[in-house]
Amino acid sequence: MSYPVSTTAPALTLDGSDITLEQLIDVAEGRCGVRLSDALAFRARIEAGPALLERLLEEEGVVYGVTTGYGDSVTRAVQGAQDLEALPRHLYTFHGCGMGANLDVVSSRAVVMVRLVSLCRGVSGVSMALLERLTWLLEHDILPRIPEEGSVGASGDLTPLSYVAAVLCGEREVWVRPSADQPHALRPTAEVFAQHGLTPYVLRPKEGLALMNGTAVMTALAALAYGRTSYLSRLCARITALSVQALEGNPYHFDADLFAAKPHPGQARVARWLRDDLAHPAAPDVDATPINSPRLQDRYSTRCAPHVIGVVEDSLSWWRSFLETELNSANDNPLIDVDAGKILHGGHFYGGHVAMVMDSLKTAVANLADLLDRQLALLVDSRYNRGLPSNLSGASPQRAPLNHGYKAVQIGASAWTAEALKLTMPASVFSRSTECHNQDKVSMGTIAARDALRVLALVEQVAAAALHAAVQGTEQRESLAGAASTPPRLAEFVIELRGDIAPLGEDRGLEADLRLLCARIRDRHWALDTGGANA
């Protein structure tokens, strides 16, 4: 998804205050612009950092990454104005070895925004001029090309962030949107700057390190993963409700009194969503069973859906806490304490909190795929689907021998689920000793975030398949009933879905349908709490 920036989007003012994950995502997806505060106190706080550095240089103070080499080369002194100016240029130059696919435009916007938010805290020793250049990139939607591979997550995202630093200095390539109706394309940065009358930026002491020595890439990717996960959790509850309806399941499995006995808040919230979707009546007598059902208890993939989806819902709060703290932190090294007049050397570039969120998130999300895959297996199997056609085929009885309905879709969903489950190995435990054993314990946070996004893509494919089939099964159940039997909220949702995808009658290739549904999921298209489209 490219998400062009809206020319009428409101602007978020940055002044060193905290922002939310949602505000970051709004900027990344083009719904919100960015501006720097004009407040004198904010600008004075920013400029005090480089002023202190200049004073320390005049006094021949020693500052890591300013008067020394980088990493294990900290023992090498850098002297003379010419070398001090060349040092940050060398930093982004030798880190220009990123590999793999390029981050998409939304992710690149998020990276620039996260770095800008961090530097606005005012303890990284950068100038207002640098902040204005980063803001200019977002304002003009001119975004660095950033290869996704090459970071171990400490000393921050050095290699991918080198592409941000290099672009500010007029080097490498940028994504540019030629016009509103065209996708972003790559162009040499120098050409684009010349077109806009912009001269390359010259990094001041510490600014190369401040740009690169932080957790901006992993945090940006993690925030995007969080947004997708939050929506996917709600969608899985909706798909579960459709599956329960199609399978003539027992809605009393989601009774409020039942969930009061095990009061995980997110789990109870999922049960409430299911009750609302299924128009769950008051609790029955203790010996009651669902109408026309021989089973007192449904299979786990529907009965225990709140317990599976609820893990995601109950984890969202601590995931948010970790990620928003990281987003609103100064996470480079060293930091500049202007008030105390000292340099703070440490390791805030370590992305352990982001890594833990992403390792946890991808496991919880993969379990959603496993849940939906099991529901889909019940829906297509005539031994378990309570009278629905085999493989949910919509073909006439005369054409049934030739038609196979959702058989291949179920195989595909099983494959995507297996791949998602396979990728849940935690990245954070695979720390490597790098850079002459200076970076001898690293977070692997960026790899964890990339893994989580890949798992999410696979789970969204499973959700698309399960949704397609569950809508078909719900309509077939109503047809068998001979009367309107779908609860109102689900009926409204089915009508909305049918605006995008047609029922499956005779076999047809469903790739286009599934890709469209995946795009709808990525766009958070359906306002699931109200049943209307989220325009």
Image: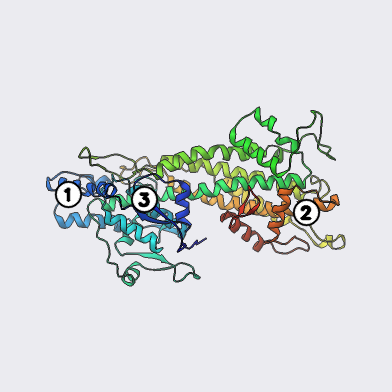
Tell which tag, 3 or 2, sits nearer the viewer: 3
State whether residue 67 appears in this view: no
| Element under disc 3 | strand
Question: Mark 3 — residue?
Answer: 14
Question: Mark 1 — residue?
Answer: 54
How crowded pointer 2 is (Cα within 10 Å; few <14, some 14-19, many 20+) is rated as: many
Q: Is residue 353 left or right of residue 72?
A: right
Q: Residue at x 84, y 48 (%)?
A: 387
Percent x, y of residue 122? 29, 46
Q: Indicate the amino acid at tag 2.
A: Glu
Determine which quarter of the picture holds residue 328: top left
- 410 and 121: which one is in front? 121
Q: Against 524, is 261 above or below?
A: above
Q: Indicate the amino acid at tag 3.
A: Leu
How crowded pointer 3 is (Cα within 10 Å; few <14, some 14-19, many 20+) is rated as: some
Extreme-left residue of the structure: 59
Q: Earlier in the sequence, mark 3 or mark 2?
A: 3
